[in-house]
Amino acid sequence: MFLFSGSYMQHMESKNDTYVSEFLLLGFSEDPELQPLIFGLFLSMYLVTVLGNLLIILATISDAHLHIPMYFFLSNLSSVDICFTSTTVPKMLLNIQTQSKAITYAGCITQIYFFTLFVVLDNFLLAVMAYDRCVAICHPLHYTVSMNPHVCGLLVLASWIVSVLNSLLQSLMVLWLSFCTDLEIPHFFCELNQVVHLACSDTFLNDLVICLASVLLAGCPLAGILYSYSKIVSSIRAISSAQGKYKAFSTCASHLSVVSLFYCTGLGVYLSSAVTQNSRSTATATVMYSVVTPMLNPFIYSLRNKDLISALRRLLGSTPGKGPVCPPQKSCP
């Protein structure tokens, strides 16, 4: 990859009159009085995100009763959420602290690569988790066979491969672009669309690839989620007892909340960018799915989840010796 990057950099130097060494991230506000408030707010959200998701990961690893597919996928989602937030927030905090808006060209491309990687990976993991709940509710007798450790590992691996290939393609295509003197990005990180629109060269191919990738890599997982929940709803409606319906629905309520939050905030970003020309308002909307959603996920999944709460308590040493409600099942890798 680095050899490719070097050849692309040489190609860019030959095309540009002025070599691009850095971009300027304008952030949310240029008002100096607001910078301490923004710094404190984002530092708090970042620490809560990292701590909350890290506790979920440690709880699922340390408790043998949580070595089942649902928590295997949840720990993967928590890992991705930590990386997702770490791609953008630390650099923004550093810029505020040092009173600098600059990000190097290499740093900008790196942000584009990892942000694109983790946002697509989030999409696929949410779809995989919906499929897991669909199999558990619609085909409970075949669940342990259908969602065996090998299948779980393959689903996560496939999600990573598609996400990495897409991110690599998008990043390499940005490296081919020529940039002029206007290098100000009205955002708190190097967002792919914003960077592409700063280019002096023709961006038709970039826009086409971004559009196709967005439709396929966001649309397909969403379609899978909607299909899984349509099957889940049909199965729940077929259950005769109200208690049985409630128990079945409660196993996927947390996931449904996270999916709704992620896709609704993502849709809000798209609509805000389409309706208004103010890029700062788009940046504010982006915070919802890139920072707030990863921060809230651990709380949503822990809410009313007795098994996870018990594991967290044992991890923190509050209630040693008390086991979870559910029986152990075959673990994922």
Image: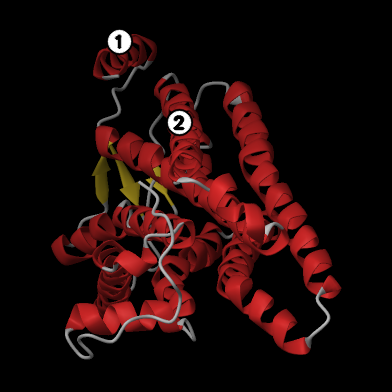
Q: Residue at x 62, y 31 (%)?
A: 207
Q: Residues within 10 Å of mark 1 (few under 14, many from 20)?
A: few
Q: Secondary structure at mark 1?
A: helix
Q: Nearer the viewer, residue 16 or 260?
A: 260
* Residue at point 20%, 90% (across, down): 318
Amino acid type, label 2: Ile
Judge whether residue 277 can be spotted in this image: no
Q: Is residue 145 left or right of residue 322?
A: right
* Label 2: how many Cα within 10 Å (few below 14, some 14–19, many 20+): few
Counting from the top left corner in percent of width and height, residue 152 is at 47, 45
Q: Position of residue 13 (x, y in %)?
A: 30, 14
Q: In the figure, is residue 7 to the left or right of 117?
A: left
Q: Earlier in the sequence, mark 1 or mark 2?
A: 1
Tell me if residue 254 comes above or below residue 213 in the rendering: below
Image spot of residue 161 (x, y percent): 45, 31
Quadrant holding the N terminus = top left
| Cα separation between marks 1 and 2 | 24 Å
- Up the image or down, 143 lies above or below 167; here it is below
Q: Is disc 1 in contact with disc 2, using a CB cutoff of under 8 Å?
A: no
Residue in the foreground of this view, choosing between 31 and 3: 3
Q: Which residue is mark 2?
A: 161
Q: Which mark is residue 85?
A: none
Question: Which residue is found at the position 60% from the left and 51% from the top?
Answer: 127
